[in-house]
Image (tube, grey):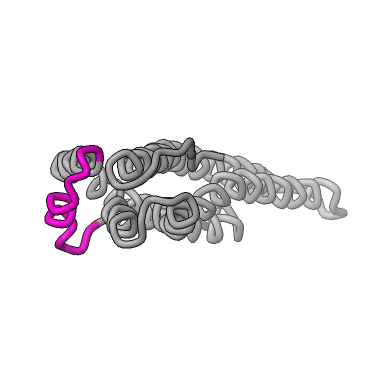
């Protein structure tokens, strides 16, 4: 109960800006957990082994082995590989499929990026409102008897600034790690297409990177 009371005390002292900060922090945690689970499953040891076996089957032109590896519904690499088997490893087909799969690998990336940018700005907004509150008291006609009246505005300014920076930093590290995983996925997409061209079709210079 004491911790809960302290939480609401901080929220009250931080002013109205603390509630939007609380909302986006919850979103950041939910998105980070969902993306962490997605990348953990996609790049697990078992899935990585199956991905390498699939590359080997493509390079050797072993269509039957590739089909056996792709029998069950799979991940984004399986979806691209199945498309290469069904329609052939040409540039147009590969680009079309990869653009569709990017919606899965880059899901919520813009959300985390926005949170990293917006959190400090919300903190600064709280800083401004807190300072305005303090100056209104200092510039008022009535004499200030209790110094806590002024310190309340200063506390609001400091608490919101700290809250915004903490949320931004907490969201920044998962965002950067997920970007690394997304780049890794693009590299694997390219490897799948290249291997498919070597074993299933003519080899042409091609890259999915921008």
Q: Is 60 one of the magenta-colored residues?
A: yes
Report the side of 69 relative to 30 (left or right): left
State the residue at coordinates (36%, 55%): 88
Q: Nearer the viewer, residue 118 or 83?
A: 83
Q: Nearer the viewer, residue 210 or 83?
A: 83
**Figure check: 131 above or below 78:** above
Could you tell me which quadrant the N terminus lies in?
bottom left
Could you tell me which quadrant the C terminus lies in?
top right
* Residue at the extreme front: 202
State the residue at coordinates (57%, 51%): 114
State the residue at coordinates (84%, 53%): 140
State the residue at coordinates (61%, 43%): 120
Q: Is 35 one of the magenta-colored residues?
A: no
Residue 82 position in % (x across, y down):
28, 58
- Place residue 31 in its image quadrant: bottom left
**Figure check: 180 above or below 101:** above
Residue 100 position in % (x across, y down):
45, 60
| Residue 71 visible in the picture | yes
* Region rendered in magenta: 59-74
């Amino acid at each position: 109960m004491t911790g809960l009371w302290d939480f609401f005390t901080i929220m009250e002292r931080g002013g109205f800006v603390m509630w939007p900060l609380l909302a986006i922090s919850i979103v950041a945690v939910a998105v980070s957990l969902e993306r962490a689970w997605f990348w953990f499953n996609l790049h697990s040891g078992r899935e990585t082994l199956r991905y390498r076996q699939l590359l080997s089957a493509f390079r050797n032109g072993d269509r039957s082995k590739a089909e056996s590896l792709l029998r069950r519904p799979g991940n984004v690499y399986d979806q691209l590989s199945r498309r290469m088997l069904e329609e052939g490893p040409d540039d147009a087909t590969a680009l079309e499929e990869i653009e569709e799969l990017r919606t899965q690998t880059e899901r919520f990336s813009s959300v985390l990026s926005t949170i990293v940018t917006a959190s400090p700005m919300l903190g600064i907004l709280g800083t401004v409102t807190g300072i305005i509150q303090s100056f209104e008291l200092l510039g008022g006609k009535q004499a200030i008897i209790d110094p806590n009246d002024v310190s309340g505005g200063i506390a609001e300014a400091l608490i919101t600034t700290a809250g915004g920076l903490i949320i931004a930093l907490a969201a920044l590290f998962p965002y950067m790690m997920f970007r690394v995983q997304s780049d890794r996925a693009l590299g694997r997409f390219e490897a799948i297409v290249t291997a498919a061209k070597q074993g299933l079709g003519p080899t042409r210079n091609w890259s999915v990177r921008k």
